[in-house]
Amino acid sequence: ALILNVIDPKIGGVMILGDRGTGKTTTIRALVDLLPEIDCVSDDPYNSSPSEYDNMSDEVRNRLANSEEVPVVKRKVPMVDLPLGATEDRVCGTIDIEKALTQGKKAFEPGLLAKANRGILYVDEVNLLDDHLVDVLLDSAAGGWNTVEREGISIRHPAKFILIGSGNPEEGELRPQLLDRFGMHAMIRTERDPDLRVQIVDSCQKFADDPKGFRKEFLEDNQEFANQIIVARANLSKVVIPAGLTRKISMICSTLNVDGLRGDIVTNRAARAFCAFDGRTEVTDDDVKKVVSLCLRHRLRKDILDTMDNGDKVMATYETVFE
């Protein structure tokens, strides 16, 4: 789910729920190592791209329109953590009214959304975050711009990021309408196989003893993985999805009584991204099978009398429609 969002950020982020101590946060933080460095305008606080018009702040666009030289620097993809106690001003940024009144300048103090532009915004324990803040994050992630209005002054900046949330369902559920806004939903369960558990414990110990050596061991694999992601991003626009498959995806959503059309759209996008990651240009039934549960499990209506897991229900419907 994380990799598919990196390939196509329009999928709309990932919500990862699961037992405590299952490595959710570790996996998300490790994602940054797989991402290529990006070109940024060095004196711009929003990580603006020097060449992609859609990823530029208004200020950089004006400078380029006036034929000014903009200094360019390569940076790692930003990964921003949103603390649980963050205020709306800290998240969205705030306008310095004193400077605006005394000097007549629009003085903007960028927030976390500005730092996360063209990167990843990670919210741990998203189910404990104030609903209003989650709304703000989802709106910015969907629209790609953040607007701050205060005392008659309005400032906007690009805020295109992949929103990743994690949490433990025992600590409280997320409202269904907020859950629906996340493109994909992964459920993590504790590993029961003793051999795999031992392998994980050994790896943790190796990393604790020699972090640099441990990372070196996997450097080649990570590089190969990163290259695969870069190629997939470049080839995404060439991937086609047959009309028959799109119809079957919609049949699954309809059979499961999924509200709205987000489920259909996200499943189509995720299947295309998976196909590109696999190095192909035409989506197959198997691509849909790989992603359909991740895209739809959190969109089903809750039935307290139903004992069947949502993921299993989605897969059962897939088998019925695709047989």
Image (cartoon, rainbow, N blue to C red):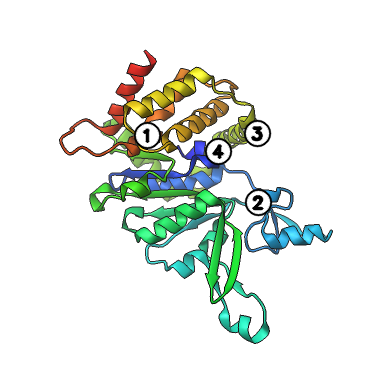
Q: Position of residue 276 (x, y in %)?
A: 57, 28
Gap between marks 1 and 4 measured at Cα: 17 Å
Q: Which residue is mark 2?
A: 55
Circle 1: is it few (<14), some (14-19), or many (20+) Cα within 10 Å? many
Examine the rendered structure and indicate whether residue 89 appears above or below residue 48: below
- The structure residue drawn at horizontal position 64% and vertical position 57%, both measured from the top left corner, is 47
Q: Position of residue 95 (x, y in %)?
A: 56, 74
Q: Position of residue 232 (x, y in %)?
A: 60, 31
Three-letter code, disc 4: Asp
Gap between marks 3 and 1 measured at Cα: 27 Å
Quarter of the image with the N terminus is top left
- The structure residue drawn at horizontal position 64% and vertical position 75%, both measured from the top left corner, is 106
> Which comes before the other along the chain, label 3 or label 4?
4
> Which comes before the other along the chain, label 3 or label 1?
3
> Which comes before the other along the chain, label 2 or label 3?
2
Gap between marks 2 and 3 measured at Cα: 17 Å
Gap between marks 3 and 4 measured at Cα: 10 Å
Q: Which residue is mark 1?
A: 296
Q: Which residue is mark 3?
A: 234
Examine the rendered structure and indicate whether residue 199 appears above or below residue 74: above
Residue 8 shows which numbered tag? Answer: 4
Three-letter code, disc 1: Leu
